Amino acid sequence: MKQNEILDQMIEEFRLRGFTPGEATVRRELKVNRETHYFLSVGWYPEGTAPDEEELNPDGTIFIEYHLNSGKYTSFLIVGGCDLRNNPAALQAAGKEEAIRWAERKTGLTYKEHFILSKEAADGEEIEYKFTKTYDGTPIFMQGLFSLTLKKDGTIIGFQLEPGYPDKTLFSKAAKDLQWYENTLLNQLVLLPYPDAKQKAYVQVYAVEEVFLNENGTAVLPFEFSESRMLGVYPEKILTWNKTESAITPFVNKRALIERDLPEWEDALRNKPHPDAAPITDGEEESVIQAAAGHLQKYRPDESGKWILRNICRDHSRLTAHLYPVNPSALFEKLVYLLEGTEIVHEIDTSMMNEALKEFASPAPVAVSKKEAAENLRPHVLTKPYWVWDSKTGLYQKLWMLDSKHLVLAASGEIISENDLL
């Protein structure tokens, strides 16, 4: 289908007569199964309006996204919730049953077999329904969220859809129930100085570092809320070197942090693979390890053995390395290296974010052991099952996310909520 035909279809589908289309742009996403999805995004402006000098969109502007792979609409949003269309499409009612039937029609999926209603929330004159795709009753991680927003009279004022549903052959045999995971919980506890905004002071807390467990309670995959990182590799390599003289001058970034991915219409027509789709090779992994170690040796010569390379992925066609401290000592401690070939061209050091907290008072001494903290936190630990894509096997594996919304004060052993420190 040609672009102008899609725009004409949008006018009829969403009752957009009198609206003026803005520039149509093509974007693409790389999914965890390495499939490339293309979308056509268009903003529609009410008659006689346009973005202002600061490029802010007027109330009533409508943004629509069309999934070019499937020929279905995946996003619809009205700016400011102000619907200026004549006779817009509406459901018979704004109730749960109507919302579920709408979801079934738009996705081609069956309620309870392929998705569930995960949240229903009313806000003034609007009601939002959030859905989660499932397989065999278990949510699909990172691939299964979609939503519908209605006015109380049933008028549709927004939706977000996730295209497609994985073939059942992509799911591994269901795992058994989760077994005891005490050792893993102990390993996932980290001691951190956490800023207490109310007291303007640091407090030492034990917190759970999220991870995915197999049925034996063994940590098998880090928690990632990034599809690009899930497609990468996890070296878990502590970087060491023989101390040498440090660089005379600090490292200066040689390239911009982010370069926009701007695919062409022809790329979508050919379904050209995303530039980040290629798997990380063993040779690339080794070259990144060597580059990261060499960079640290030159610019942080006294920190041998203090950084662990957790993840290597592709981001905007560049190999990207994510490093974390072996023994965290601050809330924000992470290094990200962007490479071109074997050369690091950009460094992100999140420790700069700690500058905003430098006036906070020092924490009280640690009086509770890690084992004691794990015992105290045990009743507050959450384990939720998900189907998680495993790039090594090319299958969705049934895993359990280990997490907790609570912390243990290292000075007293008291259990507190994360929100208590905000």
Image: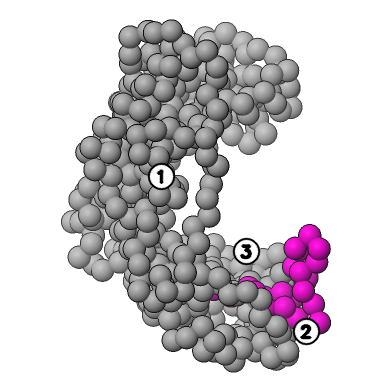
**Residue 390 in the image, given as x and y percentages of width and height:** 27, 49
Q: Which residue is mark 3?
A: 121
**Residue 347 in the image, given as x and y percentages of width and height:** 50, 31
Q: Quadrant of residue 249?
A: top right
Q: Which residue is mark 1?
A: 318
Q: Which residue is mark 2?
A: 47
Question: Nearest the camera: 248 or 395?
Answer: 248
Secondary structure at numbered mark 1: strand
Secondary structure at numbered mark 2: loop
Q: Is residue 69 left or right of residue 120?
A: left
Inter-mark Cα distance, 1 to 2: 43 Å
Q: Residue at x 37, y 21 (%)?
A: 294
Q: Quadrant of the C terminus?
A: top right
Q: What amino acid is at disc 2? A: Glu
Q: Nearer the viewer, mark 3 or mark 2?
A: 2
Q: What amino acid is at disc 1? A: Arg
Q: Nearer the viewer, mark 1 or mark 3?
A: 1
**Residue 415 in the image, given as x and y percentages of width and height:** 55, 26
**Residue 38 in the image, given as x and y percentages of width and height:** 43, 69
Magenta region includes residue 59: yes
Span highlighted in magenta in the image = 43-65
| Image position of 216 with respect to 237: above or below | below
* Crowd class of label 1 (few under 14; some 14 to 19; many from 20; radius 10 Å): some
Task: Say whether residue 329 is visible.
Answer: yes
